Image (tube, rainbow, N blue to C red):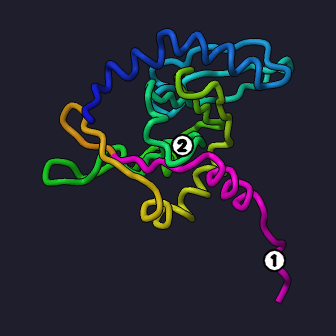
C-alpha cells in the first residue's frame, strides 16, 4: 500500500482530530481542555496536549487506522499497528527507528482509534510501557503476526499488526517486576 505522509497528517488533523478531542476528554478523568500540538511538538511525537484541572499536561500521540482495516484482522479483535521502522534502511536511507521504539519521543500516552465501520473501540496506552513491551516482544511479534511495509513518498516504513489483547498482556507484563535482592 502506498501512503502520502502529508495526506495522512491532514487526515489525522481533520475530522479525526475533532473526534480524538472528544474521545480524549471522555477517557481522561479531570481533563479540562485539549489542544493541538505545535509543529515542533508534533516532530517529538505529540499530537495533542490534554490539560488536567491541576494544570498538569499530558502529551498524547494519536494513531488512527483507515476504514476497512478489520478485514485483515485474524479474529474480531482489533489489531494495533506498531511501527518498527519509520524509514527502513536501504541504499538511499540509513534508516530511522519506528515511533514505537523511539526513545526520544516525549509522548506519554498513545490513542489508538479506528473507523466506526471497523469498531467503536479505542485504546489509550502508556507510551513507555508500550515501547518496553514492543522492544521485548518485537522479534516474536514479527514472526507471529502480519507485518507489512508502507510505501511513502521516497521511503518505506514498516509495521507489525498485533491484536490488542496481546499488546495489553505484554504491556501489563512490562509494568511488573521484582525488587533486586542485595548480594
Q: Is residue 104 above or below residue 111?
A: below
User: Where residue 43 sits: x, y (%)?
Assistant: 44, 30
User: Where residue 52 sits: x, y (%)?
Assistant: 80, 21
Q: Which residue is drawn at 55% across and 56% down?
A: 134
Residue linked to disc 1: 180
The quadrant where residue 53 appears:
top right
Q: Where residue 118 is drawn, which disc sits there? A: none
Q: Is residue 70 magenta?
A: no
Q: In this view, does 115 lie to the left or right of 155?
A: right
Q: Is residue 42 left or right of residue 95?
A: right
Region rendered in magenta: 158-183
Q: In this view, does 85 lie to the left or right of 137?
A: left
- How far apart marks 1 and 2 lie (CA) works out to 35 Å
Residue nearest the observer in this picture, 140 or 108: 140
Query: Closer to us: mark 1 or mark 2?
Result: 2
User: Where residue 51 sits: x, y (%)?
Assistant: 74, 19
Q: Is residue 60 left or right of residue 57?
A: left
Instruction: Looking at this view, name the residue that lies furthest to the left.
Output: 91
Residue nearest the observer in this picture, 68 or 134: 68
Q: Residue at x 49, y 34 (%)?
A: 44
Count the marks. Answer: 2
User: Where residue 122 sits: x, y (%)?
Assistant: 65, 30
Q: Which residue is drawn at 67% across and 40% down?
A: 125
> Tag 1: Cα neighbours inside 10 Å, few (<14), some, or many (≥20)?
few
Q: Earlier in the sequence, mark 1 or mark 2?
A: 2
> Tag 2: Cα neighbours inside 10 Å, few (<14), some, or many (≥20)?
many
Residue linked to disc 2: 79
Query: Element under label 1?
Result: loop
Amino acid at each position: 500500500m502506498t501512503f502520502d505522509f502529508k495526506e495522512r497528517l491532514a487526515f489525522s488533523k481533520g475530522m479525526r482530530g475533532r473526534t480524538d478531542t472528544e474521545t480524549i476528554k471522555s477517557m481522561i478523568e479531570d481533563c479540562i481542555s485539549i489542544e493541538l500540538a505545535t509543529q515542533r511538538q508534533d516532530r517529538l511525537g505529540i499530537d495533542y496536549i490534554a490539560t488536567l484541572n491541576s494544570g498538569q499536561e499530558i502529551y498524547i500521540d494519536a494513531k488512527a487506522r483507515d476504514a476497512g482495516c478489520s478485514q485483515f484482522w485474524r479474529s474480531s479483535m482489533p489489531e494495533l499497528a506498531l511501527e518498527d521502522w519509520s524509514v527502513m534502511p536501504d541504499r538511499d536511507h540509513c534508516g530511522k527507528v519506528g515511533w514505537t521504539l523511539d526513545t526520544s519521543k516525549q509522548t506519554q500516552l498513545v490513542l489508538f482509534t479506528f473507523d466506526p465501520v471497523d469498531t467503536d473501540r479505542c485504546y489509550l496506552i502508556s507510551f513507555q510501557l508500550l515501547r518496553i513491551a514492543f522492544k521485548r516482544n518485537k522479534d516474536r511479534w514479527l514472526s507471529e503476526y502480519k507485518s507489512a511495509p508502507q510505501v511513502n513518498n521516497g521511503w518505506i516504513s514498516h509495521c507489525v499488526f498485533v491484536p490488542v489483547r496481546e499488546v495489553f498482556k505484554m504491556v501489563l507484563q512490562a509494568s511488573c517486576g521484582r525488587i533486586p535482592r542485595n548480594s
